[in-house]
Each structure stands twice: as structure tokens, then as C-alpha cells.
Amino acid sequence: MLGLRWYEAKAGFWSGCGMPYFMLQAVEYTGDRMVSLDFGTRQFVIEGCGLDVLARRIKEGSALAVVEYAPAVWPQRPERPIVTAIRRMNSRDIPG
């Protein structure tokens, strides 16, 4: 199971989901700044920097959770690597 967690800044609370690895159909990455995950009916885009290790660990099935950095929760921004956004893509957002 891969846990994804992001902070809803306007509402002031955490949201997230857990996705089973057996549903993961594809992991794509652009350099070390963007990773996209395709779970069939759900797609996610993870943005940040230094994400090449994260992409490798997800492909291996060894990552347990991905947590988005939230300045409201952690005022001191960590050094690299950092996840700055986790976005769930809707079917209308996906070309094709």
C-alpha cells in the first residue's frame, strides 16, 4: 500500500488516500521534479525537487508514504528532496 497525503491549505486539514501497489500500472518521471502515478482509474502527479529516489523506490514497491510539504504545518522548509504538491488528476485533465 502506498499512502499519499496532502494538505488542504484553505480548509486547514490533511487529505489523502492509500493505493495498493498491485493496482499501479505505470510510474513516469520528468527529471527529478515530477513523478506521475497511474493506478488505472486514478492518476496522481507528484511535484517537487530531488524526486528521482522517490520514483525509484515507488517502482521497487518499497515506498510506504508520500507526504506533501505544508508551510502552515512546518514553517521551516526542509532541504532537498521535497514534495511540494500531490495532485489527483481527473479524467478531463488527462490528454487523449
Image (cartoon, rainbow, N blue to C red):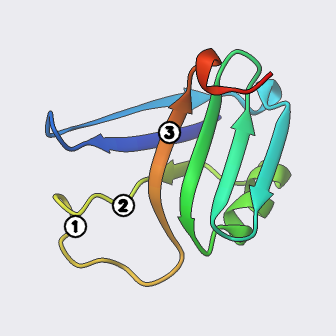
- Secondary structure, mark 1, is loop
Side (left or right) of 54 relative to 22? left
Distance between the alpha carbons at the discs numbered 2 and 1: 7 Å
- Give the numbered dot on residue 69: 2
- The residue drawn where x is 81% and y is 27% is 22
Could you tell me the amino acid type at mark 1? Trp
Of residue 30 and residue 39, the one placed in the foreground of this image is 30
Distance between the alpha carbons at the discs numbered 2 and 3: 13 Å
Up-down relation of residue 37 to residue 62 (above or below): above
Q: Position of residue 46 (x, y in %)?
A: 57, 50
- Secondary structure, mark 2, is loop
List the residue tagged with mark 1.
Answer: 74
Q: Quadrant of residue 10?
A: top left
Could you tell me the amino acid type at mark 2? Tyr
Q: Quadrant of residue 15?
A: top left
Of residue 54 and residue 63, the one placed in the foreground of this image is 54
For marks 2 and 1, the one nearer the N-term is: 2
Q: Position of residue 9 (x, y in %)?
A: 20, 44
Q: Residues within 10 Å of mark 1 (few under 14, many from 20)?
A: few
List the residue tagged with mark 3.
Answer: 87
Q: Residues within 10 Å of mark 2 (few under 14, many from 20)?
A: many
